[in-house]
Image: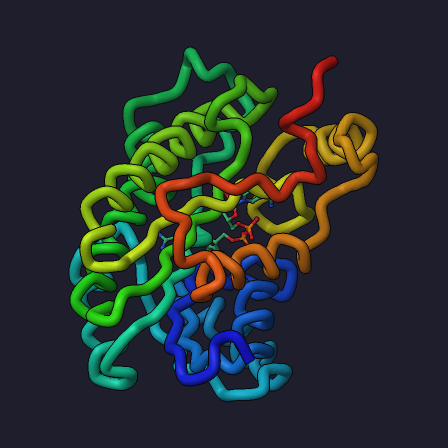
C-alpha cells in the first residue's frame, strides 16, 4: 500500500484504453484516494462505467485545460474535497488530424497554438493549481514520447509540443523543488489508445518498435502504470526534472 493516505489527481482518462486509466488503477491498488479529471459529459459517462472496478470510489472533477476558469474550478473542488494533493498525473495531448498527417512545415499557426496549449502549457496550469495543495510535497508526472527529440514520421507538431512539455518539466522541477514538489516525465513506447489512433500509420510504428527495441517486444500498459506509480510515490523521492523511458529499450538502440 505505497499510496495509503495519499490523494491524487489523474487527468486524461478518456476510456478503458487510456494510459491514465491504467495509472489510476495502479494508484488505487496502492491505496491512493483518487480524483479523475474529465473533459465533457460524454467522457464522464465513460468514466462512470469504469470506476466500479476501483477499490475506492473516485471523485470526478471536470477540467478543460484550455480554460483558466475550468482549471481554477477543478483545483477549488480538489481543495474543498481533499484539502491536499500528493500526486498529479498529466496525461493530456491533442493536435488536429491535419497537423499530424501533413508536413510539419505546413503546420498552421492555429494548429501549432492549439497543440502546444493543450499538450504542453497545460502542465503549467496543473502544476500551478496543485502547488498550494502540495504543502507536504508531492509528485507530478507527465506522459511524453520520443518524438520530442527525434523527428518521427507523422508525429509532427506533437513532437514539438512534447519537447516543450519536457523542457517545462525541468523548469517546473527547479522552481518547485524547494517545496519538495517533484516534476518528472514518463516517455512511453507506442500504446494502442484513442490518441494513438490519430497518428497515421500507428500500426507500422507499433510493429517497428517491437522489432527494434532491446526487449524485442512492445511496451505494456501496466509497465507504464507501475513506473508512474513509482514516480508519484516516496520511492522516487530523490528524482526530479527527469524523463524516464518506459520503452523496452527502444531509445538506446543503434540501427
Ligand atoms: P487518450 O486515452 O486519448 O488520452 C488523451 C487524453 O487527453 C484524453 O482523455 C483527452 O480527453 C484529453 N484531453 C484532450 N484535450 C483536453 C483538454 N482540452 N482538457 C483536458 N483533457 C484533454 O490517449 P493516451 O495515449 O492515453 O494519451 C495520454 C498521454 O500519453 C498523452 O499525453 C499522450 O501524448 C501520451 N503518450 C501516449 C503514447 C501512446 O502511444 N498512446 C505514447 C507516449 C505518450 P478527450 O478524450 O475527452 O478529448
Q: Residue 178 vs residue 145: left or right?
A: left
Q: Position of residue 151 (x, y in %)?
A: 53, 17
Residue 4 in sight in this render: yes
In the image, residue 148 sits, relative to residue 194, either above or below, namely above
In the image, residue 208 sits, relative to residue 67, either above or below, namely above
Quadrant housing residue 1:
bottom right
Which residue is rendered at x = 70% and y = 29% of the image? 201
Name the residue furthest front.
238
Query: How is the model colour-coded?
Result: rainbow
Which residue is rendered at x = 50% and y = 63% of the image? 13
- In this rendering, the count of numbered labels is 0
Which residue is rendered at x = 46% and y = 53% of the image? 91
Work out whether residue 129 or residue 196 is closer to the camera in this orientation and state it.
129
In the image, residue 233 sits, relative to residue 111, either above or below, namely below
Quadrant housing residue 173:
top left
Q: Residue 46 vs residue 255: left or right?
A: left
Quarter of the rendering occupied by the C terminus? top right
Residue 115 in sight in this render: no
Which residue is rendered at x = 45% and y = 35% of the image? 96
Q: Position of residue 228 (x, y in %)?
A: 52, 57
Q: Position of residue 247 (x, y in %)?
A: 66, 39
Work out whether residue 96 or residue 147 is closer to the camera in this orientation and state it.
147
Q: Position of residue 33 (x, y in %)?
A: 43, 82
Amino acid at each position: 500500500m505505497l499510496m495509503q493516505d495519499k490523494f491524487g489527481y489523474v487527468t486524461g482518462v478518456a476510456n478503458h484504453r487510456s494510459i491514465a486509466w491504467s495509472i489510476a488503477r495502479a494508484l488505487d491498488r496502492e491505496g491512493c484516494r483518487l480524483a479523475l479529471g474529465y473533459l465533457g459529459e460524454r467522457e464522464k459517462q465513460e468514466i462512470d462505467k469504469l470506476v466500479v472496478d476501483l477499490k475506492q470510489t473516485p471523485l470526478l472533477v471536470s477540467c478543460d485545460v484550455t480554460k483558466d476558469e475550468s482549471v481554477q474550478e477543478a483545483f477549488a473542488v480538489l481543495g474543498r474535497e481533499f484539502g491536499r494533493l500528493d500526486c498529479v498525473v498529466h496525461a493530456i495531448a491533442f493536435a488536429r488530424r491535419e497537423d499530424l498527417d501533413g508536413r510539419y512545415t505546413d503546420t498552421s499557426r492555429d494548429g501549432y497554438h492549439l497543440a502546444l496549449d493543450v499538450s504542453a502549457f497545460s502542465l503549467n496550469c496543473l502544476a500551478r493549481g496543485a502547488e498550494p495543495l502540495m504543502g507536504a510535497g508531492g509528485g507530478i508526472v507527465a506522459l511524453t514520447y520520443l518524438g520530442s527529440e527525434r523527428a518521427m514520421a507523422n508525429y509532427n507538431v506533437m513532437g514539438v509540443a512534447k519537447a516543450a512539455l519536457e523542457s517545462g518539466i525541468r523548469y517546473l522541477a527547479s522552481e518547485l523543488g524547494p517545496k519538495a514538489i517533484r516534476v518528472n516525465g514518463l516517455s512511453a513506447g507506442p500504446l494502442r489508445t484513442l490518441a494513438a489512433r490519430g497518428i497515421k500509420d500507428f500500426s507500422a510504428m507499433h510493429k517497428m518498435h517491437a522489432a527494434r527495441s532491446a526487449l524485442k517486444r512492445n511496451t505494456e500498459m501496466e509497465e507504464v502504470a507501475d513506473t508512474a506509480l513509482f514516480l508519484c510515490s516516496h520511492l522516487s523521492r530523490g528524482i526530479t526534472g527527469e524523463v524516464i523511458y518506459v520503452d523496452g529499450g527502444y531509445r538506446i538502440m543503434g540501427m
